[in-house]
Image (cartoon, coloured by chain):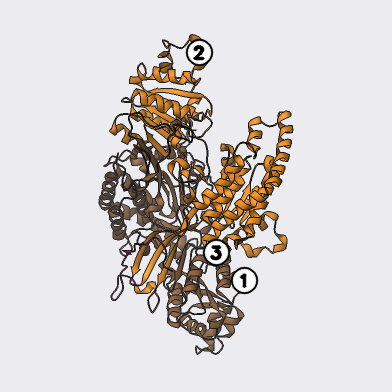
Chain colours: A orange, B brown
Amino acid sequence: MASSSSSSDQSPATAIAKAAKSAFEASQLIPSSERVKALHEIKQELENAKEEILEANRKDLSAAQVEVDAGRMSSSLLKRLDLNKGDKWDSMLQGVLDVANLPDPTGIVTYATELDDDLELYRVSCPIGVLLVIFEARPEVVVNIAALAIKSGNAAILKGGKESNETAQLLSKAIQTALSKTSIPSTYIQAIQTRAEVSALLELDQYIDLVIPRGSNSLVRTIQNSTRIPVMGHADGLCAVYLDESADLQKAIRVVVDSKIDYPAACNAAETLIVHRSLVRTIWPEVAKALLDKQVQLLCDPETRSALSNLSPSSYQLAALVHPSTPSSYHTEHLALTISVLTVSSLQEAISHINAHSSHHTDSIVTESEASASAFCRGVDSSGTFVNASTRFADGFRYGFGTEVGISTGRIHARGPVGLEGLVIYKYMLRSKSDKGHIVGEFGSGQGKKQYKHAPIHTSSVPF
Amino acid sequence: MASSSSSSDQSPATAIAKAAKSAFEASQLIPSSERVKALHEIKQELENAKEEILEANRKDLSAAQVEVDAGRMSSSLLKRLDLNKGDKWDSMLQGVLDVANLPDPTGIVTYATELDDDLELYRVSCPIGVLLVIFEARPEVVVNIAALAIKSGNAAILKGGKESNETAQLLSKAIQTALSKTSIPSTYIQAIQTRAEVSALLELDQYIDLVIPRGSNSLVRTIQNSTRIPVMGHADGLCAVYLDESADLQKAIRVVVDSKIDYPAACNAAETLIVHRSLVRTIWPEVAKALLDKQVQLLCDPETRSALSNLSPSSYQLAALVHPSTPSSYHTEHLALTISVLTVSSLQEAISHINAHSSHHTDSIVTESEASASAFCRGVDSSGTFVNASTRFADGFRYGFGTEVGISTGRIHARGPVGLEGLVIYKYMLRSKSDKGHIVGEFGSGQGKKQYKHAPIHTSSVPF
């Protein structure tokens, strides 16, 4: 417990975590309008410090260039570090305003009932507490996550990639300066630099309430293996499109091609195409042609492969892009212009394949049958089950959440694209208005005992 | 992954977990009415097997009696084993019917929006998947948990205390017999006997989606430390009542006494009483007298202790029941007729004490001030914050959930008393009804691109 260690023997991580928890607790008595004010102050402070921040960003970029030249860093990672590229700076600032303008996710009553005359129960949405967010190189994520945490009333400790340390430090300094102009404690948002601090923080479940790793599968699993704190993580995205017996040709081509090529590196891109056997010599070759036209490599089972032998593309192109699949193809998140193709004999076989091989992210059926659509949507155990629509629609902005905290591949608390709602939980407020207060001993089955009333109260906010 | 090990090298735990997952997946295509039918079959089957089950229960009781006689088991544990005591058998059966009659928590649309003409998104409640529930001696919990899992559409693996093994085996045999009379696979509910199986199952996060430990703090923490699977646990219940400056005497006495004595062994009983300094010589001695009348031991700080020196109870009684508190008193879940008492100078100090010492379960303020009530309910970071009401109201039945899965001291997914809602999550179903299907490439900011519409759809069920 907190009291068992004196402040003198605190580790730096403990001091950070305690400061975050205490900032969170203090913030509970501050009106939510102050959090919106803080977001506007942050935008202003970032504008004020723009030159200084971009100068720090140039230092990070130079250091990264040395790594790239030495072959120790990829050039795509370097690109992601650059805060001055295109409209990145402006959209980072606009993002803060967008979050400020979203509806407040806290203080919403989701259940209210009168337990007895003058005894009212309210379930009210509230922040979770202290978030520990661990992410990779892109420095603007510091601002993005800080905005989401502040809007939802959570304190946050942020750890970015070490490549963006100089930039991230100045971004978080600007955020703290902005917070100091409000009544929210400036330790509400803190940045840390080292993995050792992360390891120490993962032990402190008395102060930290949720860990959000944004990065690779291995990052998520490493963290899950090393903490008691709940983890809201995004593991892999192995999405499939299934062409049902009754699939329409045009829908099949459009949905498969978009799911694969719209953004192949995204987690909601399709990695597997499942074809009903009855379509192997009809719709499949047309779909294949459309994919080959976009330079998509096809890893085919024997049936779908042999069906392509008479295709019109040159044999050169077929030889270059069509290859036999292996069992591991169907477990692979290609994240590239590659798709694994499989034949099945039935909808049930497709559903079973997806449940055994997909990452339970998003899977789509192309079908004209209502019965198949319904069975697919219920039978496929994924966070998104789609009908005649691209898997790429699985996204918080597209779903209408206004912003995206991440995509959760977990199955509790939040699943699929997560908006601000994923950063809140609820508490129960119970108020007796009776002259004598309310006690449990007066209720029960004996003589003279009261019964619970459970009369719904229709309200969206707590009246006290 | 599943495919990487052949069935021949499967451990028994892996076979159990795979069977549970596959039963869960199969159940997704079975109408929820079948789950209600299963509950009625279970009640019938338990009635049929009553004599056999009670005979097994007598064996468990005899074996336990040997342990009690040898001083290796408490007699209270033995009492909890007895399935034939009072109305326990009948209320176990009635509980199954009660759960059957609750509203279906699955299939409920909680968000629906039209992303574009003919492109509809539905967020629909659905089961979590496979639950691993670990609990202590009481054998009727097998039936209770099985009913909750079936009603909410989750498969479950159950591990009870070894003291009730004979009984639990026959209870779960009756459940499986009942399931075999429905289209739900009989491996939907499985019972396991050994801790080794639990350890092996805790490794299998690809099959098991949620662990629910119902027992001691140390059980919950041990499990949290040894698995990547999310844990919905109930740790301790260290609840406080705060007597605010404006507290009413009668409300103070009633709320404090009920919170302490209504059921001292419960997690929602009060363990700490916090008294505003201005009440130490007015209301506090009256409250103390009421507690002493009920034989409650008071662990007092110097101020509250010295205020009792002129009390009317005999000095003998004061000496026996009033003792100085120590710092650890305020971290102790007494679970007995004992309460720790502390003086504070302000509401803020009370809130800080509770946030630092309570288990964030349920805390209550006695006050006549709206401002204090509001600040306490927001500032105290607990799952229940009450005004002029006993902490003992924190309970799923009293809250109106019809049943209680448990009380969660976690802060994600479900918090406080958990009803069937705590056993569901949601998935997103997206359907294009357009002639061409829907692709993401047609949306965006460029010329001729479509914009997302996000028009709310008002419905409580999915139309396909």
Q: CA distance from mark 3 to mark 2?
A: 64 Å
- Image coordinates of residue A109 in percent, x first then y, are 41, 60
Residue count near mark 2 (Cα–Cα under 10 Å), binned few <14, some 14–19, many ≥20: some
Residue of label 2: A317
**Would residue A131 be counted in the magenta stretch?**
no
Looking at the magenta stretch, what is its main secondary structure?
loop
Bounds of the magenta span? A443-464
Residue count near mark 1 (Cα–Cα under 10 Å), binned few <14, some 14–19, many ≥20: few
Q: CA distance from mark 3 to mark 1?
A: 30 Å
For the question of whether residue B121 can be seen, the reply is yes
Q: What number is the disc on residue B88? A: none
Mark 3, secondary structure of its residue: loop
The kind of residue tagged 2 is Gln
Name which residue lies at 55% across and 81% down. B322
Q: What number is the disc on residue A30? A: 3
Residue count near mark 3 (Cα–Cα under 10 Å), binned few <14, some 14–19, many ≥20: some
- Image coordinates of residue A265 in percent, x first then y, are 54, 31
Q: CA distance from mark 2 to mark 1?
A: 78 Å
Co-location on one chain, circles 3 and 2: yes
